[in-house]
Structures are given as structure tokens and as C-alpha cells.
Amino acid sequence: MRRRGGGPGRGGGPGQGGPDDPDDGPLPDPFGSDEDHDAVEQVHQAFYDAVETGDLDALERLLLGGALGETVAVVHPGWPVLRGRGHVLRSYALIIANTDYLQFFLTDVEVTVSGDTALVTCTENILSGGPAQPDGSAGELIGGLVVASNVFRRTPDGWRLWSHHGSPVLSGEAGDGEGPGAGPLGGPDSA
């Protein structure tokens, strides 16, 4: 989904590009251009490709650096917040080293761009597995769902990942008190 135009503050009053505005020119789009969205989508996919293929050099190039490098943060499902490029890269190195097979199928991808910051939310449909069997067949595969928020920052070198937060989607049978829809704020089945 591309969030563009028609947002809050668009048209209608003084200083907001409406009929009462002395400047008759259009306001810049607060949700970014198509080029911004395309560039963010490309770097977002490159991030997942780097993790999936175990390319730590590519991952390092995609992380925000410079003065904001130590503010880079990641939350992997079940992990505490990790801050700083070094800690974040080490966490991915550990995941890659301890996962023989990892594949992402991204769904529900939504991109919002505001100035030099972009937010991408998505669902990570993850397929991972252990080592191959002695006969050469695939090891045990495990599927899982994680919802993720990824924040990117525009730099002179292009868009860079500032923060990644992944949260597992709990599964459960309807009415068992677990998973989506469970609990007081969980959804239509909640009280």
C-alpha cells in the first residue's frame, strides 16, 4: 500500500493549500514520491534478501551509519532490544550461523514515507529448517509468522535501515484463550 496525498492537513485552511491559502501552489506530498516509495521498497527487499542468503556484508551496507549508527536498533522475536550497529550485526551473524535454511515470504507490505524517514510494515511468513539429513534430503522445516516494522532513513548514499522490530504472531485455536482475538484487547471475540 502506498500512503500518498489526501492526508491530514491537506487543503481547507490558511497555510494548508486550500482556497484561503495565499500561496496557490500545491504543497509537497507529505507521503513521499513514487521514486521514494520504489527506493524504500527496494532496500526493504534487499534487507530480507541479505538475511535470507546470509550476506553480512550486504547487511552491513544496508544499516544506517554515521552519527546515527549507534542508534540503530533491532528487536528479534523473544530477544531484548539491541542497539548499535555492532550489536545488531552480531545478532544477525548469530541467527545466520545457527539457521541452516531461512526463507521469507513477505505479505501485507505497506510503505509510508515522510520526509527523510520511511516506515515499512509487513508480515514475515518464515520458513526455516535444520541441517540436511544424512541421505541428503531436507531437514525438518518449521514455519512461523512475524509482524515487522522497519524504519529507514534517507542518507546521501540512499535509504538505510534504522530500526527493525519483529513480533511473533501467536497461533491458537479459537476459544482457547491464546493467539489473535484472545484477551481483553485482542479482537472481535474479546469482551
Image: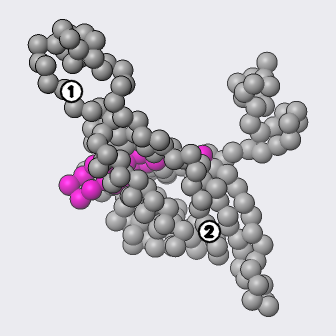
Residue 30, horizontal then vertical, whole percent = 29, 32
Instruction: Tell me if residue 184 can be seen.
Output: yes
The residue identified by callout 2 is: 102
SS of the residue at dot 2? strand
Which residue is at 74% across, 80% downward? Answer: 138
Magenta range is: 147-163
Residue 16, horizontal then vertical, whole percent = 23, 17
| Predominant SS along the magenta part | strand
Nearest the viewer among 132 and 122 is 122
Which residue is at 59% across, 61% downward? Answer: 104
The label shown at residue 1 is none
Looking at the image, is mark 2 or mark 1 earlier in the sequence?
1
Quadrant where the C terminus lies?
Answer: top right
Residue 14, horizontal then vertical, whole percent = 20, 10
Residue 153 forms part of the magenta stretch: yes
Residue 71, horizontal then vertical, whole percent = 37, 47
The residue identified by callout 1 is: 27
Which residue is at 72% across, 60% downward? Answer: 143
